[in-house]
Image (cartoon, rainbow, N blue to C red):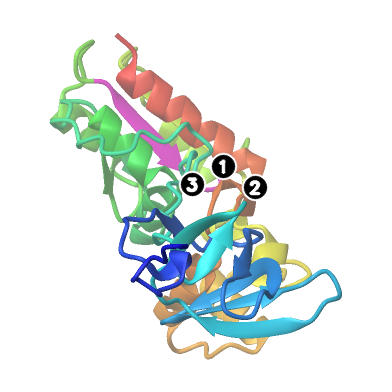
Amino acid sequence: MRSYDPDLTPAWKRSAPVPEVPADPDLVVEEVATGFCGAVIRCEAGTVTLEDRFGKHRVFPMEPRGFLLEGRVVTLVRPAPAAPVRPTRTASGSVAVPGARARVARAGRIYVEGRHDAELVERVWGDDLRIEGVVVEYLEGIDDLPSIVAEFGPAPDARLGVLVDHLVPGSKESRIAAQVTSPDVLVVGHPYIDVWEAVKPSSVGIRAWPTVPRGQDWKTGVCRALGWPSDNTGAAWQHILSKVTSYKDLEPELLGRVEELIDFVTAP
């Protein structure tokens, strides 16, 4: 006389533990009740969508023991959320150091002419400067640069770097810079009338920076020429700054000078 198992529950529904498998895209499984076999193309709250080899889609609940994977009963579960991708480079192009803490500020400093210069340097080199412990300050112009340098008191362990706008032969800025002769001070500059011009026109969405007649306020003239409100150059600058995401948005004439100053101030 043949004996029968009193438990008529199908084998795939019995209570033996089965592995939980993330429903990752392209995972090929078979739904046990219908025999539908396909690759996972979408996983939502409580359901999984499979696509068979003919391109047909079916949506199934992700019930316990609901699928076969290579002939074995499994329970599909939602994949773990992907970890956020950490940037490998800073905005300046340097290798990023995840979790690095800001270094205690050095005695050395980098001075720039104005607030816009300082904000642009922070935008691109901020991460690097914090790791190196370099503080950037702005001067509201360099007319008094020699006395500012003297007050700072540069020394081998407290070097000073200065970034100057429109540092070209014969300019007022070049004559002022020439008065600074300390070996512990490096004065460099870019050729642009204002740091706005150091942002590539293509990044701002314009063909070129307008030419402003001499004797006219440059920022105001630029706003007028571009059809921007000329009574709020601060708002215009914030618009320009928002378009800068990395060193690729800046002209080489500025990039090289800032890198030079950072190297000078942080040199042993």
Callout 3 crowding tier (Cα within 10 Å): few <14, some 14–19, many ≥20: many
Quarter of the C terminus within the rendering: top left
Q: Residues within 10 Å of mark 2 (few under 14, many from 20)?
A: some
Residue 14 in the image: state x and y as whole percent.
Answer: 36, 66
163 relative to 202, above or below: above
Circle 1 SS class: helix
Q: Magenta stretch: residue 161 in it? A: yes
Say whether residue 68 is left or right of residue 101: right
| Mark found first going from the N terminus, 3 or 2 | 3
Give the residue at mark 3: 91
Q: Pointer 2: what residue? A: 251
Q: Residue at x 34, y 13 (%)?
A: 267
Which one is in front, 191 or 127?
Answer: 127
Q: What residue is disc 1 on?
A: 254
Residue 216 in view here: no
Q: Are marks 1 and 3 in contact (CB under 8 Å)?
A: no
Side of 174 where 104 appears, left or right: left
Main SS of the magenta part reads strand
Q: Specify which label sits upstream in the sequence, 1 or 3.
A: 3
* Rendered position, 247 above or below 46: above
Q: Amino acid at mark 3?
A: Ala
Looking at the rendering, the stretch of residues picked out in magenta corresponds to 159-166
